[in-house]
Amino acid sequence: MRVRRPNPLMEILRPLGQLLLFILGSSVVISGITILIAVLIRGTRTDMDLLQITLVLLPQVLIDGIVLGFMYATIALGYTMVYGVLEFINFAHGEFFMFGAFAGVELLIWMQGQGWLPADQSVMAYVFLGLAIIVGMIVSGTISVTTERIAYRPLRGAPRLVPLISAIGVSFLLQDVMRFYQSAVNGAFYRSFPTFGGFSERITLFTLPLDGRDITIAIQLTSIVIIVAGIVMLVGLNYLVNATRLGKAIRSVAQDRNTSYLMGVDVNRIIALTFLIGGALGGAAGVLWAFRFTRADPYMGFLPGLKAFTAAVLGGIGSIVGAMLGGMVLGLLESFAASYLSIFTQGAFGAEYKDIFAFAILILILIFRPSGLLGGKTTQKA
Amino acid sequence: MSAQSSAQLSPIQRMLKGPLGLILVFAISVGASYLFVLSPRSLIVRLLLLGSLLLIYYMPQKGWIKLLFGGVMLLIVLPYLGLFNPFLMELGFQIAAFATLALGLNIVVGFAGLLDLGYVAFFAVGAYLWAFFGSQQIWHMDEPPGTFTIYPTFPFPAWWFWPFLIVGIIAAAITGIMLGFPVLRLRGDYLAIVTLGFGEVIRVLANNLDKPINLTNGPQGITPIQRPPLPAYFTSQEFLNQLSDIAGRPISLNDIYGFFFYFVAIVVLIIAIFLARRLDNSKLGRSWTAIREDDVAAVAMGVPLRRTKLTAFAIGASFSGAMGVIYAANRTFVSPETFSLTASISILVMVILGGLGSIPGVVLGAAIVTLLNIDFLQTLSLQLSSLRQGSGFIPLTSIPWSSLPTQLDPARYQRLFFGLLLVVMMIFRPEGIIPSQRQRLELHEEPVDEPEGAVIEGEIEPDHKLEN
Amino acid sequence: MAPLLDLQGVTKRFGGLIAVNNVNLAVDKGTITSVIGPNGAGKTTIFNTITGIYKPDEGDVHFDGQTIAGKRPDQITALGMCRTFQNIRLFHNMTVLENVMVGGHTQSKSTVLGAVLRTRSFKNSEEETRQEASRLLRFVGLPAGLGDQIAKNLPYGQQRRIEIARALASKPKLILLDEPTAGMNPQETESAIRLFRKLRDDLGITVVLIEHDMKVVMGISEYISVIDYGQKIAEGTPDQVRKNQRVIEAYLGRSAAAEIAAHEGAN
């Protein structure tokens, strides 16, 4: 590794640039392919103009995809960091995410009970939302570190499948612990995200004149908040890993655990910190997820978790930049599949197949390019 | 077992030694059976009865004696007791069915060391195969779910169940090979996630293939599915009356099918045990162990990796496919719900709880988990709900039972128990209750730090992969 | 007569690193050949490329009259070439006998169906494999009754011998031994050398060694190839190699070599 003094400003601008590049790049590529398909099969439908409807939907689909992409990317970071350090698929990461979501939602529900939450847009709404995100991060981070200590650390060095099976167990256990808690305390196992702060308001970006009608393209305030929060976290993590002493220790443990140990790095502490950071990011993503989809339930972590893992593999597991790219690509693909699959196949295959899409991508990537989009051949320690 | 010297016997086994032990086991079995006749609904007596089977397995006697004892219990005593409480046959059927599934998964995970988290997909293949051909679904393919009438006849007569049992085995094996072909070069943990994805894909397909052509009838599932025909004598009123006299309760045709499926499942389980043992104890079994221990060395000794792994996948899947066909006929109803990730994990829990790679262990694990699933938790739920009806209070608190939310029904917390079992087993006893000798050594092995160059190509880098 | 094993311009790269660079190597039938070179010179990579664990990026490998580059390791083993590993890779938790029986994989004719039905031919074939395995264990000089031991519980020297027995079970024409005497004491080394000779003299197997111990190399080899930085820098009989200037440099460094040369010149 080259010894260089990191330039703090560069460490902020570089990931920003990368993010912008990934968003633009994957948006253009995926939109291009979709429009091409629409042109090719335009003749198959007589009841509507496929190309026109494709174009009308496009901005909204893109925004949804990018929002989803930011959430996947944030969750994927947890997988990728743990994998980078331990070469271990933390199957329970989706449940850390779920705990974060519940923590945030519970806090906001409590605040609502106190009458603190403003109904309309105000600075305080952002403060409270930020507070919920931070509480979500703390809870998820704590659960993550505790899990590592109890269920993973004693199994370090055991055959590969042993900690993985333990992680599957933790995942199941946490789901039902939360279900039990919610059932016992609230009598129902899911919680709704309180409505406040006028976040559901839509901001009109522009209008498209089409066929004599004006199509308004708007973005929900929720989406903007998620995108901004996503950017802050991704850039922050990049800074932490690339420009701080702690980051250097994490990278050294990921490179070679034994040597780092000999060099005086407290490996156990670094691994715990990795779990803390990964879990906290997952928790933040959980609160944002509940914010976006307006509820938290004990099983909400499974699919996003699996997809975020797919995103991590897609980008090249172990690579932080890769997780951001993978998340973005997967979010966009899913959003496109959910919107266009049904239109293109005349309703034969609908949005239900969007989940299969992620798995199909995962299988294809693992078969043809297991090192991921960004992974060089040498990133993988086998 | 019988070859063990007395020094290696556990305290319980020492008690069961010699003719005296034989008499003791006999007495316990007879006692449990008698208690069952007295109170056929008691969970504790059911446990005692199954426990006596375990004692028969554990007693240090000659193999043929144990076989005789076990055979009489399974094929004569239990069915007889089933007359008094049909649930015993249902329990026996489910245990045997899941034990067969667990044995299949054990070939993949325990013998060959490939973690398959979507194993239930092969079960689904078998079940949906007979569900489709053994019901009227063929006639409903162009109708959306919930719109059609039930006809008096079926496209395939019921006896086709038997040929389809074979077709189910083959179809599941082919599915196993199709899945295995692209993914088996992946490393263990990646394989686990991909198989999990595959399991989900099968479930999503089952849920959604009600359009454009209605193949699976979507989330509503397919029903009615035919059961195989029985010889006329067993379904005659005269025979039913005879049984009713013995049982002291009316025996219906449904009960007869309960006995029938119990016997079918036991026979399939015995065949599965037989197959698993013989395969383990052969060149193929050695190759599986070799691959699990060190695939580089194995391939260098001439063991073809891909083919050997595929064989494990195919054989494991075929067990599952056979049980799928039987399960569809037993339930007369198949829906996607049965084939969830929880089902795959519960089978994995059976294998791990009993002991990876250990055939008796896996059967025991299946028995315990199935009991927990369909008997213990259900009984607990029933008890709780009867308490909820009453006016008592939760012990040590002033909360009345009646205020307990119904969402706390223990039967809904399978995942909690499975999760806990998995974590606890991995930390404290990864080799399971009845460990296989070799897995015990492997799972407690200190990690060997592999020097560079020991990395097999093709595990992760496809550019210069092993093309087998 | 064509050589039994013939490497022609074999190159193997890992990313930007050229581990093996355009190596030619010919091994005649019935010889004992050594491949030597400093640590990290690419010797084991050459072995891995020959046995199919790696595919050569360039060049060709011929064995027994056919090209084997691109074949799978198990196919190559079936053609009659087997190996041992530098860091012993026994199946740790299998018994010694089972280890050797896995080695007999390509020789055994038992089938899955035969295993299920326990046919006479299955029983015969299993018994044959077992007998052959015990015979090989005796041949490599292991005490009787070791067959039922778990492999990892045995001392290092015996594990090395088991690995050789396991390789022999595939009835190879050529055996590749990767540092077979590493970590042995002088007595053990002495008896290992006798075993390698026996492989050739009694079984007629062509032997290729990777070795560090110069006593072993010089004492046993009929032919030596020297590898450094992935390239073959010298080859010939032990005497030729011993006097080769580039070999001395590779092993001792340039300055030391110059010193020796000066010293010899002065004499």
Image (spheres, rainbow, N blue to C red):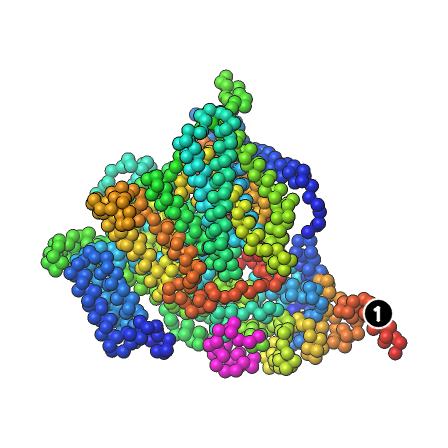
Q: Quadrant of residue B5?
A: bottom left
Along the viewing direction, whichever of C28 and A350 lies nearer the viewer: A350
- Image coordinates of residue A4 in percent, x first then y, are 71, 47
The chain ID associated with circle 1 is: C
Q: Residue furthest right?
A: C266
Position of residue B429 relative to residue C144, above or below, is above
Left or right: residue B81 compared with residue A199: left
The residue lying at 67 percent from left, 38 percent from top is A9
Q: Is residue B90 left or right of residue B7?
A: left
Question: Which residue occupies the foreground of this view, A275 or C28?
Answer: A275
Residue C139 colored in magenta in the image: yes
In the displayed structure, C106 sits above or below A132; it is below
- Is any atom of residue B258 visible in this view? no
The image position of residue A3, as x and y in percent, is: 71, 49
- Residue A168 visible in the shown view: yes
Q: Position of residue B262 (x, y in %)?
A: 25, 58
Label 1 residue SS: helix
Which residue of the protein is positioned furthest toward the top in this rendering? A212
In reply to whether residue A106 is colored magenta, the answer given is no
Classify mark 1: residues with Cα within 10 Å, few (<14), some (14-19) or many (20+).
Answer: some
* Residue A220 appears left or right of B417: right
Residue marked by disc 1: C258
Q: Which residues are magenta?
A: C130-156
Report x, y in % for residue B131: 31, 47
Where A127 sits versus B11, above or below? above
Identify the residue shown where x is 43% and y is 51%.
A170
Of B117 and C80, the residue lying toward us: B117
Direction from residue B326 to residue A191 in the image, left or right: right
Q: Nearer the viewer, residue A136 or C108?
A: A136
- In the image, what residue type sits under mark 1? Ala
Identified at 49% across, 59% down, the residue is A155
Q: Quadrant of the C terminus of chain A?
A: bottom right
